[in-house]
Image: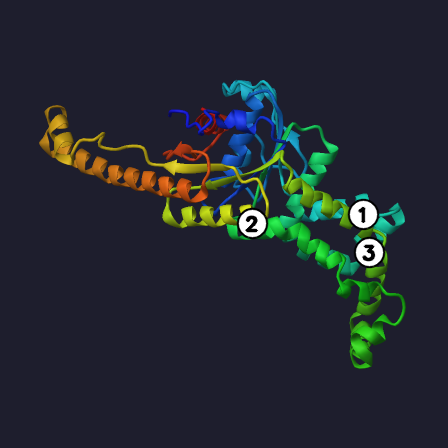
Amino acid sequence: MTAVKDRAGSTLASRLRPMRVVVCVGAGGVGKTTTSAALALGLAQRGQKVAVVTIDPAKRLAAALGLKELPGEPVRIAAKLLADQGVAMEGELWAMMLDAKGTFDGIIASLAPDEHTRDEILANPVYRELSTAVAGSHELSAISKLYELYEHHDFDVIVLDTPPSRNALDFLSAPKRLLGFLEGRALQVFLAPGGITARLFGRGTALVFSMFARVTGVDMLSDLSTFFRLLSGVLEGFGDRTRRVEALLRDEHTVFAIVTSPEPAPAREAAYMAERLAHSGMNGSELIVNRMHDSDLQGHSQQEVADLLSEELGESLAARVAENLADFDALSRRDRETVKRLAHTLHRREPVLVPYLDEDVQDLRGLAHIAEHLFA
């Protein structure tokens, strides 16, 4: 496929070269996770040390990377495995799957003032329930892991997969929402010393909790009080970390790549995402369109194609082939028109186009094939 260049004549590889963080966003079902892995592979092939962080990938992606499963911390893809599949590699490719609960526990462990406080928080029943619920929001855990990899590792580039696009809005606003909670009045009520039971729950509710404790052996009020007392020791560090993450998402060396397909619904999602990125002050300068149909009639009519093929295939088979090709021609024209409108709406560089592939990615060779289209 011919390389698609922007108005300045640069390729995707040159545009991404100065970037430290590439965040892939877009609708579900458009190949975003595979694109994230292919982007990382392509950058690593060009000499950079790259980590790709995926969110709930299909098992076949782990298999494609030569792993039984993706771990919760970055692991390097073996050079021998790459060589065995004929994938040239000048740099290093590392991969991991987001472990939401483990990431959240790691934040607490790193911010706790001492080991005793850390162990108390991690063992607290309220924390265990809360961290599971919060960690269920992949957005918060994703940006936390992004910050950790950025600050404490020596990767040249981090490629981050994200949840589907409407949830990606939560991803963009997660730092601000967390800061609002940490600095809000509601939390300060919990942290205020003394009288929490009477002031917050009232005597009637406190009595219910007391009866609950006698029946179940779980002292909910005590657990709550202990949890928020312990939490006060990590709030300052948590708030500072969150502000740093928010700044990182807006850094000039962070770029958001909008991944879509030419179908109308994902294309509308892409336009919506671009609008939100711009409104949030994010650098959303890349548009990648997967699954482009590129088979067409080459300017001929269906009948002309049938006539051209009839001598070799016979009239009946040539007519069926021409009819099938005419269907693909219609899809190809639809895709080109959709991309044209989308590029105009987004005021973006010419999009990077990846053709529709007949087979799913099964190995590193398949990922490298997609990378060839991305970095042509």
Q: Quadrant of the N terminus?
A: top left
| Image marks 3 and 1: residues in contact by CB distance under 8 Å | no
Q: Give above or below for 4 relative to 118.
A: above
Q: Which residue is mark 2?
A: 279
Identify which residue, 215 or 251, lies in the foreground. 251
Q: Quadrant of the C terminus?
A: top left
Residue 188, disc? none
User: Could you tell me which secondary element the residue under label 2 belongs to?
Assistant: helix
Q: CA distance from mark 3 to mark 1?
A: 11 Å
Q: Which residue is mark 1?
A: 237
Among all residues in the image, which is located at the extreme bottom?
Answer: 204
Sequence order check: which comes first, mark 2 or mark 3? Answer: 3
Sequence order check: which comes first, mark 1 or mark 2? Answer: 1
Q: Disc 2 vs disc 3: which is toward the camera?
A: 2
Q: Amino acid at mark 3?
A: Leu
| Image marks 2 and 3: residues in contact by CB distance under 8 Å | no
Classify 10 Å Cα crowding around label 3: few (below 14), some (14-19), many (20 and above).
some
Q: Is residue 65 visible?
A: no
Q: Residue at x 50, y 48 (%)?
A: 275
Q: Amino acid at mark 1?
A: Gly
Name the side, left or right, on which 249 lies relative to 218.
left
Please identify the quarter of the rendering in which residue 7 is found: top left
Q: Residue at x 48, y 50 (%)?
A: 272
Q: Which residue is mark 3?
A: 231
Q: CA distance from mark 1 to mark 2?
A: 28 Å
Q: Residue at x 82, y 60 (%)?
A: 228
* Image position, residue 311 (x, y; %): 10, 24
Name the side, left or right, on which 357 lies relative to 163.
left
